[in-house]
Amino acid sequence: MTGFSLETALTFAVTSLVIELTPGPNMAYLAILSASVGRRAGFAATLGVALGLLAVGLGAALGLTALISSSNVLYQTLRWAGALYLFWLAWEGWRGETETSPGKAAGEGDDRTRYFMRGLITNLLNPKAGLFYVAVLPTFVDETQPVIGQATTLSLIYVTVATLVHGTIVLLADAARPWLEDERRSTFVRRALSLLLVGIAIWLLFATRH
C-alpha cells in the first residue's frame, strides 16, 4: 500500500538515525533546555520538534518544500529567519534567562507551552529539515507507485526515529542535572552548548546557501 518494501523502510530508518546523530540545532537546544530546566520541559520541546518535522515532511509530500526551494526569496527568507532564531536561542542560553536557569526554573516548570512552541518554530524554520525531505527522502521513493503515500510514510518513520533520539538526549541531559547544580559547572556547560548552537547556525547558513 505504501509502495516500498520493508527493506527500504529499514534502510531509510537507519539513514535517518545516522543523520539525527549528527549534531544539529535540535540536539543542542534540547540538551541546554533539559540540563537547565528538566525533562518535562525537554519533552515538551521534543513534541514541538516532532510536530515541526512532521509538518515539513507533509509539506514536502504536497510539494510545498520544493516550491520554497525553487523560490530564492522564500528560501532565503526562511533560511535567515531560522539562523537568526537559533542565534537568539543561543543568546538566551548564554545569558541564562529565567526559563533556562537552574536556580530560577522551579517556578517555570509547568510552563511547557513555551518550550513546545520553541521546538515547533525551530523546525519550521530549520533549512536542514527541508533539505533532508527534498534531497534524501526522494531517493527512497518508488516513482512507479503513489508518491504522496510513500512520502508521508517515510516522513512518519523519520519523525519517529528523530523523536527517539531527541527523547534520549532529554533523559541524558536531565540525568546530568545533579552534577550541574554547581553554578560554575552549569554556566560552563550551558555556554559551551550555546556556542555549539551558534556554530551550527553558522554551518547551516553555509551548508544551505544556493
Image (cartoon, rainbow, N blue to C red):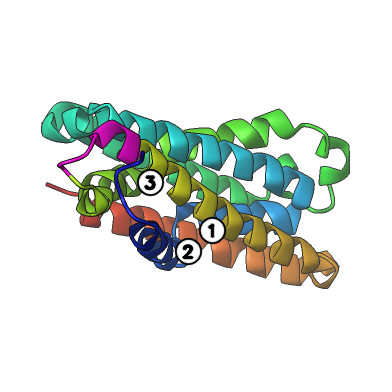
Q: Position of residue 140 (x, y in %)?
A: 25, 53
Q: Position of residue 116 (x, y in %)?
A: 63, 34
Residue at left 43%, top 31%? 55
With respect to residue 178, does 109 lie above or below?
Answer: above
Q: Can you tell which mark lies on residue 154?
A: 3
Disc 1 to disc 2: CB gap under 8 Å? yes
Residue type at mark 3: give it.
Answer: Leu
35 relative to 58 in the view: left or right: right
With respect to residue 52, does 193 lie above or below?
Answer: below
Report the front residue among 9 and 113.
9
Where does the magenta region start and end? 143-151
13 relative to 145 in the view: left or right: right
Q: Position of residue 161 (x, y in %)?
A: 51, 55
Residue 81 shows in this picture: no
113 relative to 124 in the view: left or right: right
The residue identified by callout 1 is 28
State the separation of the CA atoms marked 3 and 1: 25 Å
Residue type at mark 2: give it.
Answer: Leu
Name the secondary structure under disc 2: helix
Badge 1: residue crowd in 10 Å (few <14, some 14–19, many ≥20): many
State the separation of the CA atoms marked 1 and 2: 7 Å
Badge 3: residue crowd in 10 Å (few <14, some 14–19, many ≥20): many
Name the secondary structure under disc 1: helix
Residue at left 82%, top 44%? 105
The N terminus appears in which quarter of the rendering? top left
Magenta stretch: includes residue 79: no
